[in-house]
Image: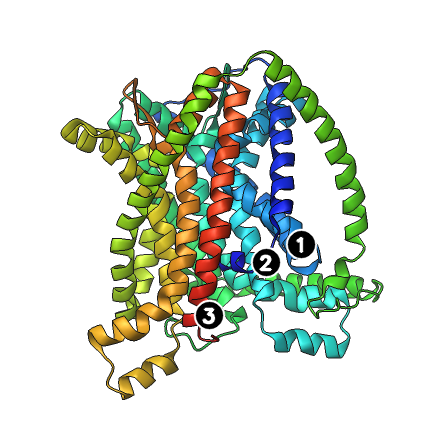
Amino acid sequence: MNQKAGNRTSPGVLALLLVLLVFLIWTIFRHSARFHPVPVGGTDLASLPGDLARSVLRLFAAYFISLVFAYVYGLLTALTRWGEKILLPLLDILQSIPVLGFFPAVIFLLIHLFRNPLEGVELASVILIATSMAWNMAFAVFESIRTAPVEYKELLDGMQAPGWLRLVYFLVPVTIPKMVYNSILSWAQGWYFLIACEMISMGSVHYRLRGLGSFLVVSTSSGKILDALAGIVLLVVTVVLMDFFLFRPVVVWSQRFSIDQSASLAGETRSVFREWLMESDVLALPRRLLSSSLTAGMAGLYALLRRLPKTFPAGPDGHGRGMFRWVSPVLGMVSLFLLSILGYSGVESMKRALASGVPWDGLSELPLDMIYSMLRLLAGYLLSLCWTVPVAWYVFVHPRLMRTVMPVAQVMASVPATALFPFIIVLVVRTTHSMNLASILLLLSGMQWYLLFNLLAGAGTFPNELREAALTMGVRGRLFLRKIFLPFLFPSIVTGSITAFGGGWNALIVSEYVVYDQKNYSVRGIGAFLDKVTYGSGNEILIVVSLLMLTVVVVTLNRFFWTPLYERVTSRYGLDG
């Protein structure tokens, strides 16, 4: 997420956002604790296909919500004066909160708004899945717009193009390639956290939905390895089929919107299914009907847009921010009203909670828990780096392997860590008697794929001209790797490292506390601490403080380590630097 490098938010704004976030979480926890559990559904092997269908529908619904959020939030962040100062750091904070941190919000705001608890739980599950998808996609919109060539912006400025024209013919198309790529990552994240989102718990409140995620967690916690293996196989088959019939055709389609057509691996991706759809005589009539319908629809939309007032000039910096000028005062007034209510409720809730006693014993454990978790994250990161860089180099040398490596990596990234519990416990814990090693291996499942995807993307953009120039000068083999390829890949390594650590922070909740065969396996760390207080005691003070500590650590690392490192790497090794 190299967009973070441009974040110049002051510490005061970050501190204010953190305080408001604490009030929000605290208020929701205090209110959600008043409700009582309503059990939902069960699971068995015979219903596995139906469970899979339910999970896929939830994922599609969550993706649609994430897509709408990503474009609205991403456009506001990129095109408004207050976007980078407020919305971007807020997005940075939100993505650092584990899925568990959103449990009280959905319990309070969604589940209990419905007379039928099942409807509320279904909606809550979809929203929770969306929290694992949306942030990544919003960053894609922001980065695509901010890194778009200046010539296009200047051309639209010279034409005095209205806001809707900028949106339809520039802002949306320029985001499509990165949005498609990040959507695949978001789907993998959705599969990964499906288990947590179908098993919603906080203290004495427990909900379980029928779905593949809940099936896997029930089978692993009860020690049914064959059932868990059947669920994993079905998950892998589903991901492979979706890649063949959905993702790969969309990736090929998105290449037409790519601005840089000179990348060394560009054009290597192909879709047999899409080629069959486009060339089949049997589908000629449906294709014509669909094409004419889309043409008529676009013509109607174009006519509607032309009637809109053309009073949305570009902003003073040429980024088209003026089209959102009317949004700022409206959002400002609404936000001020909501924050006033939120602040008052948060202060009152905090007073009542503190009056009931502060769990000092639990709070005193948090700093050391955080240190242990950071050490495991560092170990997992180094292990990830050790194998992803060689793979990226090998794929760069043999470009055709991209067609195989990307789908395989996508499948592997989609397997939830909880589904690996039986194999990790049997092969590692019971053999080496080390839960620390098992925890690091589980962390790998949440970190390594971010690195691999970013490194493959970086290798795929290596310019042909640079490679040909190096070969002409006799730079080959290890010399080429050391002097040209690795320096070119450094920005992608840093970007992948940022996203890998982001995934690692979230993966802590499923890697430090494991339930298998009705036994608990845990190590000391912030993830295990959050698991125990969220699923066990439900103590709102411990949950809020642990989430706050986690958020502060993540934001501090991003601001004072990753951002300066990225700026230094891009200025020294970037093609424009």
Percent position (x, y) of residue 205? 52, 17
Q: Quadrant of residue 36?
A: top right
User: How far, Cα to Cα, is label 1 from label 2?
Assistant: 10 Å
Badge 2 element:
helix
Q: Earlier in the sequence, mark 1 or mark 2?
A: 1
Is residue 255 shown above or below 343?
below
* Mark 2 surroundings: few (<14), some (14-19) or many (≥20) residues within 10 A: many
Nearer mark to the viewer, of 3 and 1? 3
In x, y percent, where is residue 288?
A: 59, 66
The mark nearer the N terminus, 3 or 1, is 1
Q: Amino acid under label 3?
A: Ser
Query: What residue type is disc 1 on?
Result: Gly
Residue occupying image coordinates x 66% and y 73%: 153
Look at discs 1 and 2 and give the one toward the viewer: 1
Decide: is 394 above or below 334. below
Is residue 192 visible in this depiction of the protein? no
Name the one closer to the observer, 195 or 139.
139
Q: Is residue 253 left or right of residue 513?
A: right
- Amino acid type assigned to the residue bearing label 2 in the image: Phe
Q: Which mark is residue 83?
A: 1
Contact, mark 1 vs mark 2 (Cβ under 8 Å)? yes
**Earlier residue among tags 2 and 3:** 2
Pointer 3: what residue?
A: 571
Residue at 62% across, 54% down: 74
The residue that appears at 62% across and 19% down in the rendered structure is 30
Q: Nearer the viewer, residue 9 or 28?
A: 9
Q: How is the image coloured?
A: rainbow
Label 1 neighbour load within 10 Å: few <14, some 14-19, many 20+: some
In the rendered image, the residue lying farthest to the left is 431
Identify residue for label 2: 142
Residue 521 as seen in the image, left or right of residue 238: left
The Cα–Cα distance between marks 3 and 1, rounded to whole angstroms, is 24 Å
